[in-house]
Image (cartoon, rainbow, N blue to C red):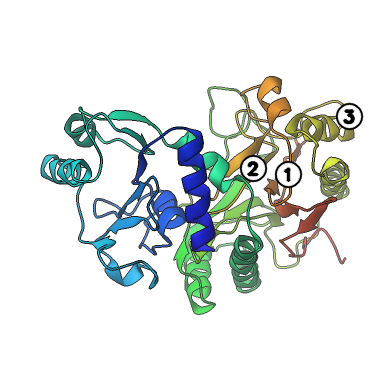
């Protein structure tokens, strides 16, 4: 799997006429090298982060890391080196000197993040965004990558089985977080990806936090807020296994015996109808715009997702990556995003009735040669089985 990823990066370096990559983001380093790094969130491991260097034409990447124990065993001698601190002047100068030993002056390098000290230190290189290489290389997953995503999702879903019994009036959001984090590591997770979200949704948009776009505020951080009987909670979590992320989303109702109202059941049914319509359109050759139109038609002509968010996104070493479906980049962007086998979609429609809150869940699907296969599998309690 790691050799295949390196080969895809090499193909993209050649296609974009780049001499190499310098990657600082945790997920990008994991993709390029297979290195495991303790992460404080889904994007970076504080100041002491690892750096990946990919040289065009080289057989293996180079990993500069304070965590050599996380390096995969197949990296050759001389390809796992000590740490640099690219966010500091001295560290950036050291990394620049390292790169000058491996690239000619004026070399074109793709970077995913460029701290100010590193930007100053690399003034003799031609720096471009690494996204042109990383996006296509990560877009379609191999069968092994899909297995890793499924493994992460299984652990995430299994942990929720232990969290749900805690969902009672008087429990804090952070109590749910504590139970969840303990359980995922007991089940074999490598790291947590995002701060778990247990967001209590107000009945109306106006009753919630103010937003610049006038739509719902989601997600918001979890706090010590006490849950109350009848609260509608939107859940969103993500963990990592072998560098690959899960993405779990559900709507829960707080109570000792929670029962959705008839209107809440209708919201759930509308959500399912949107998902089914999108899946009907999901196949190789379909565009992201086709999926958006299917979702809107199934929701009576109204967009069933949050402003400045998306109908669907990919998942891989990032918890949200290409393909992105239904963003505010517009229809032209959606139209040129064409589905192909191996692409992964996390569908997350939102059904909202202002005055009665709404329903949101997430499901993961991989595009196959003739349709799709589902990678997530968790019940919709308390909206089913009663």
| Label 3: few (<14), some (14–19) or many (≥20) C-alpha neighbours in 10 Å | few
Q: Can you name the residue that lies furthest to the bottom here?
A: 186
Cα separation between marks 2 and 1: 14 Å
Total labels: the figure holds 3
Nearer the observer: mark 3 or 2; the answer is 2
Q: Which mark is residue 313?
A: 2
Instruction: Describe residue 60's horizontal placement relative to residue 289 as left or right.
Output: left
Q: Can you name the residue that lies furthest to the left here?
A: 90
What residue is pinned by disc 3? 300
| Label 2: few (<14), some (14–19) or many (≥20) C-alpha neighbours in 10 Å | many
Residue found at x 65% / y 31%: 205
Image coordinates of residue 260 in percent, x first then y, are 81, 55
Q: Earlier in the sequence, mark 2 or mark 1?
A: 2
Residue 171 in view? yes
Image coordinates of residue 76 in percent, x first then y, are 33, 67
Which type of secondary structure does the marked residue at label 2 adopt? strand
Nearer the observer: mark 2 or 1; the answer is 1
Q: Nearer the viewer, residue 348 or 119?
A: 119
Image coordinates of residue 213 in percent, x first then y, are 58, 22
Residue found at x 54% / y 45%: 137
What residue is pinned by disc 1? 340
Q: Which mark is residue 83?
A: none
Q: Quadrant of residue 158?
A: bottom right
Cα separation between marks 3 and 1: 28 Å
Cα separation between marks 3 and 2: 23 Å
Does residue 73 lie above or below 346 as drawn? below
Instruction: Describe residue 72's horizontal placement relative to residue 87 as left or right.
Output: right
Could you tell me which quadrant the N terminus lies in? bottom right
Does residue 282 lie above or below 163 as drawn? above
Residue 225 in view? no
Which type of secondary structure does the marked residue at label 3 adopt? loop
């Amino acid at each position: 799997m790691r050799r295949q990823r390196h080969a895809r990066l090499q193909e993209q370096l050649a296609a974009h006429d780049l001499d190499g990559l310098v990657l600082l983001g945790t997920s990008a380093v994991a993709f390029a090298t297979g290195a495991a790094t303790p992460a404080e969130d889904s994007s970076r491991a504080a100041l002491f982060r690892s750096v990946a260097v990919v040289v065009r034409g080289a057989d293996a990447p180079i990993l500069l890391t304070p965590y050599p124990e996380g390096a995969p065993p197949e990296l050759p001698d001389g390809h796992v080196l000590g740490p640099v601190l690219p966010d500091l002047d001295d560290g950036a100068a050291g990394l620049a000197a390292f790169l000058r030993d491996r690239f000619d002056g004026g070399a074109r390098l793709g970077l995913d993040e460029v701290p100010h000290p590193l930007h100053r230190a690399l003034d003799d290189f031609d720096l471009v965004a690494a996204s042109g290489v990383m996006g296509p290389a990560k877009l379609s997953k191999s069968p092994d990558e899909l297995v890793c995503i499924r493994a992460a999702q299984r652990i995430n879903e299994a942990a929720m089985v232990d969290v749900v019994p805690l969902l009672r009036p008087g429990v804090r959001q952070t109590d749910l977080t504590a139970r969840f984090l303990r359980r995922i590591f007991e089940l074999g997770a490598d790291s947590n990806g995002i701060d778990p979200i247990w967001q209590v949704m107000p009945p109306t948009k106006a009753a919630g936090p103010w937003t610049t776009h006038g739509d719902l505020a989601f997600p918001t951080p979890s706090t010590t807020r006490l849950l109350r009987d009848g609260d509608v909670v939107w859940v969103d979590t993500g963990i990592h296994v072998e560098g690959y992320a899960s993405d779990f989303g559900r709507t829960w109702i707080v109570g000792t015996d929670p029962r959705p109202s008839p209107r809440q059941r209708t919201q759930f049914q509308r959500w399912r109808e949107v998902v089914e319509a999108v899946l009907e359109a999901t196949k190789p050759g379909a565009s992201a715009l086709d999926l958006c139109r299917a979702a809107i038609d199934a929701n009576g002509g109204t967009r069933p997702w949050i402003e400045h968010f998306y109908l669907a996104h990919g998942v891989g070493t990032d918890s949200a990556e290409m393909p992105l479906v239904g963003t505010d980049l517009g229809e032209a962007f959606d139209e040129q995003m064409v589905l192909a086998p191996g692409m992964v979609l996390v569908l997350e429609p939102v059904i909202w009735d202002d005055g009665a809150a709404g329903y949101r869940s997430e499901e993961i699907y991989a595009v196959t040669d003739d349709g799709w296969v589902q990678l997530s599998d968790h019940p919709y309690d308390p909206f089913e089985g009663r």
